[in-house]
Amino acid sequence: MATSSSSTAPQRWSSRWLFVLAAAGSAVGLGNIWKFPYIAGENGGGAFVLIYLVCIAAVGIPIMVSEVLMGRQGRSSPIHTMRKLAKQAGRSQRWSILGWMGVLAGFLILSYYAVIAGWAVSYIWASGSGTFDGASAQMVGATFDEFLASPMELIAYQTGFMILTIWIVGRGVTKGLEAAIRWFMPLLFLLLIALLVYSFNSGGFDQGFAFMFDMKWQAVTADSWLIAMGQAFFTLSLGMGTMMAYGSYVPDDANLGSTVFTIAALDTVIAIAAGLAIFPIVFANGLEVAQGPGLTFVTLPLAFGQMPLGNVFGALFFSLLSFAAITSAISLTEPALAFLVEEYNAKRQRVAISLGVICWALGLGTVFSFNIWSDVTFIGGLTFFDTVDYFSQNILLPLGGMLITFFAVWLLPKGMLDSQLGIQSTGISWAWRVVAGIIAPLGVLAVFTSTIWPLLSGLW
Ligand code: TRP
């Protein structure tokens, strides 16, 4: 029976450090590279960076600690962990709904993440082969539009990315996740450093630095706080059980506080470094900064196309984006995968393939949102892609995060919480409760209501 018991044998990260890298791999993704730099520049530069740091410390870290500690306490998939912990705490089994919400969010996010990551992969070739060398803004824009208009091309890259993701996760924690992390994370650091050196010498460094770090307090609005909080939350991969699933593989002797702090610090440093790699290149070519897809797939290729060795560094940039995306994608499947393997004592590989196929099919909706279904809209005029994105990111994740910290702080037996965290003094224990049990959930509540309010009021 050696084979069937292997699927239930407890899995563990080989070391605390591998958990740090895996969690940072999940956290560092499209959010760091195409979102953070832009919103920082637009919302007050250095002033926004400070606000963002406050949000990471007051909301992000407490929620991440809660997720990881619940995972390590439950030592199983988020759904089973919630069942176990609710039972131990004498609470309703309905708390396992939290685990189900996470599974759903993971599916939805991965379905479109794979499509967009596919764009990044295709741009490795496009840049490397010199498509953008000396191209005009119009030509670069047209290349992107034509790409989006072709479902077959998008599906080809989406499929390739999904196959790689499923192949990695199917191999298990040690042979799959860890092996990928050991390769991709060092590569990601190297690429980022190479791009930083390049941008430092681009001639636009001062301007790029000023865009991100000048203290423009007049640009800070109440909205900036909400944006910072939402970003802190999304970038750390919180609210859907990913960190709970990864936490279930954390060795017993790892100190959770310092481990989570390291993960959040790595994520933040990489987001800032991404901005310092991107903006100087944009400014050196006298271009305007745009947001999201426009910045990444039009402005940047255009800028690289004007620069010496631009095709090489363009290809490196899109490789960076692809590596960041794959280490996030593999973490999105873990809550669902771990649950099905435990529940049915099934082979990981088989479960991974089934999940992958469903997720791939769902992703076709995102592919078509950019071409044949671009006119099909749902509530609030959102396309299929926008709807999936909105529902997962603005509803499922914040709701999940809020309930997770609330549960960890107020419903788990106090002794369990303190021993997981290694807290010995009553003062620290109370300080922790105030930050993680009151400030963090309230912060998320503020973001949550402010994002769904316009949607609700749009309904009538
Ligand atoms: N953190 C990822 C990024 O910055 C995106 C993300 C959000 C995510 N929630 C997640 C990734 C859950 C994995 C799991 O792009």
Image (cartoon, rainbow, N blue to C red):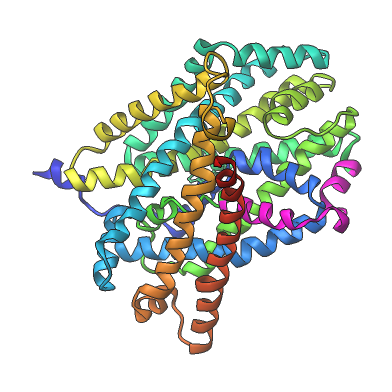
| The one of 162 and 448 positioned closer to us in this rendering | 448
Q: In which quarter of the image is residue 440?
A: bottom right
In reply to whether residue 123 is colored magenta, the answer given is no
Asked if residue 179 shows in the view, the reply is no
Report the span colored magenta.
206-233
Majority secondary structure of magenta residues? helix
- Left or right of 433 in this view: 315: right
- Percent position of residue 93, x then y: 25, 62
Q: Residue furthest front?
A: 460
- The residue under the point 66% across, 36% down is 191
- The residue under the point 35% across, 47% down is 335
- Percent position of residue 174, x then y: 35, 45
- Percent position of residue 310, x then y: 78, 22
- Quarter of the picture containing the C terminus is top right
- Left or right of 311 in this view: 257: left
| The one of 420 and 372 positioned closer to us in this rendering | 372
- Quarter of the picture containing the N terminus is top left
- Left or right of 231 in this view: 299: right
Q: Quadrant of residue 61?
A: bottom right
Q: Residue furthest bottom?
A: 426
Q: In this view, does 244 lie above or below 414?
A: above
Asked if residue 292 shows in the view, the reply is yes
In reply to whether residue 224 is colored magenta, the answer given is yes
| The one of 395 and 401 positioned closer to us in this rendering | 395
- Percent position of residue 123, x then y: 63, 20
Q: In this view, does 257 lie above or below 317?
A: below
| Marker count (numbered) | 0
| The one of 181 and 306 positioned closer to us in this rendering | 306
Q: Is residue 348 above or below residue 162?
A: below
Q: In which quarter of the image is residue 126?
A: top right
